[in-house]
Image (cartoon, helix red, strand yellow):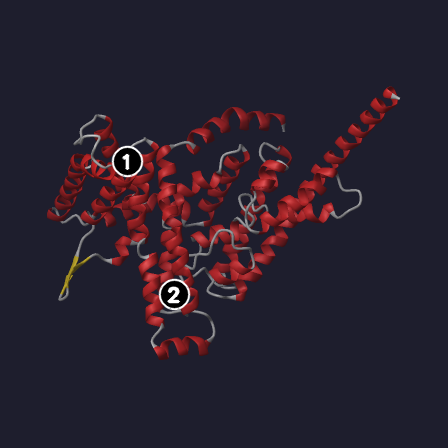
Amino acid sequence: MKKLNEFLEEKMLPIAAKLGANKVLISIRDGITLSMPLIIIGSLFMIIASFPVKAWTDWLTAVGIDAYLWKGVDSSFGLMGLVASFGIANSLARQNKVDGVSAGIIALSSFIVVTPFVSGETGTGIPVGYMGSKGLFVAMILGIISALIFIWFIKRDIQIKLPDSVPPAVARSFSALIPGAAIITLWLVVFAVLDKMNIGNIHDIMMIVLGGPLGLLGNNIFGTIIAILLNSLFWFVGIHGGNVVNSILQPIWLMNSDANRLLFQADSAAHLPNIITLPFIDNFVYMGGGGATIGLVIVIAIIARRKNASKMTKAMAPLTLTPGIFNINEPAMFGLPIVMNVSLIIPFILAPVANAVISYVAMASGLVARTTGITVSWTMPPILSGFLTTGNHISGAVLQLVCILVDVAIYWFFYKAVEKQNLALEAVEAVEANEVNNIMS
């Protein structure tokens, strides 16, 4: 255990710290997070439009409301790539102390420049698919490159400067003219070259170049287990594992979610193609937060009811259980603590791995409905979230209950060992306190 602790502190912690502070990874996380409210709002429309009561869906169809609800779904889910292009560039620019809004707007314009238009009798438009999940890879690459170029121009003072008397908003807009013209021209040239050479558009190319390798990690259970292992190890040394691992794999999980959503929208009885989606990861693997700590907080609450429970356990039970139900595990991570606590590293890795394997097998075998693309807030409690994300299917709630019981069983043995240590330490402290009292008296 001592050697493991030394390895984590000396080898893992520096790597985790560098990755956790990486500006590019932070910008990807922030950019994708910016679109999450739209995805959740679209999910609400989707829940209403597809609620599994035939009389309800028939009524929606009869009065013509269902079409409007599904348009609301398309108009929210269908913008995640477009929004991410702005958010990624905005975040990266702000981290480098330059105007993030201007950088984001230029990246958004560049995103539209590289996206092929479609023409019809009513005019020219942009395919919704490219603005949504299919555009996430381009949003990442384009947002990062556009922001870096924008930062390069501003840092070297290659900009139009107006007098201090000019309103700041006007001054910023003129300051962005030169870098903005250069960036948009660059992406216009890229689009023209690809178009003239009949290579295809940049969206389809990025799906092959980035989607293939990342898909090997994020589209199967073995890659998911590796991601869980890395997530838990980062968390264990005090770095938010989700911010590091999810920044890389979240685009794949979101695209899988959206692919399921589109098929479910077309036919609610269709066989959905993807098991590993963002709702699968958030609501079935990481119940209670990183490390699937909902099992741990339940164990603490059970042991705390015993008369001979340690003071630590009795104190932590109310502080960890309620937040844990809503997938907030910082009180447990830093209060117990879990961070750098070698006694809990095995269940912290094993519990989410068990959840992933059980959930994957259950969905692959058809025993449990797959996630339909509905995304709920990450604070949605288990059981309810399982029901909603599987398209209001009771099997999703049952699966979550089974996983919670497994998590409790995994954490039970290991926390019992921690509890023995707590009781032993408190006994020593009590003896020392008595000796001090005897001396004083």
Quadrant of the image for the N terminus? Answer: top right
Secondary structure beneath disc 2? helix
Query: Disc 2 residue type?
Result: Phe
Residue at screen point 73% across, 46% down: 303
Percent x, y of residue 313: 70, 41
How far is the residue under mark 2 from the one under mark 1?
41 Å
Is 433 drawn above or below residue 269 in the view shown?
Answer: above
Is 402 drawn above or below residue 437 in the view shown?
Answer: below
Instruction: Report the residue that reaches farthest toward the left.
Output: 196
Q: Is residue 29 left or right of residue 135?
A: right
The answer to whether one can see residue 338 in this image is no
Mark nearer the viewer, 2 or 1: 1
Q: Is residue 255 left or right of residue 362?
A: left
Q: Is residue 304 left or right of residue 142?
A: right
Query: Disc 1 residue type?
Result: Asp
Instruction: Report the residue that reaches farthest toward the top.
Output: 439
| Residue that numbered label 1 is attached to | 99
Percent x, y of residue 123: 14, 62
* Nearer to me, 183 or 172: 172
Q: Is the residue under label 1 in contact with that under label 2 (CB below 8 Å)?
A: no
Quadrant of the image for the C terminus? Answer: top right
Secondary structure beneath disc 1? loop
| Residue that numbered label 2 is attached to | 264
The answer to whether one can see residue 39 in this image is yes
* Nearer to me, 60 or 158: 158
Query: Which image quarter: residue 62?
Result: bottom left
Earlier in the chain: of badge 2 and badge 1, it is 1
Is 108 drawn above or below residue 400 in the view shown?
Answer: above
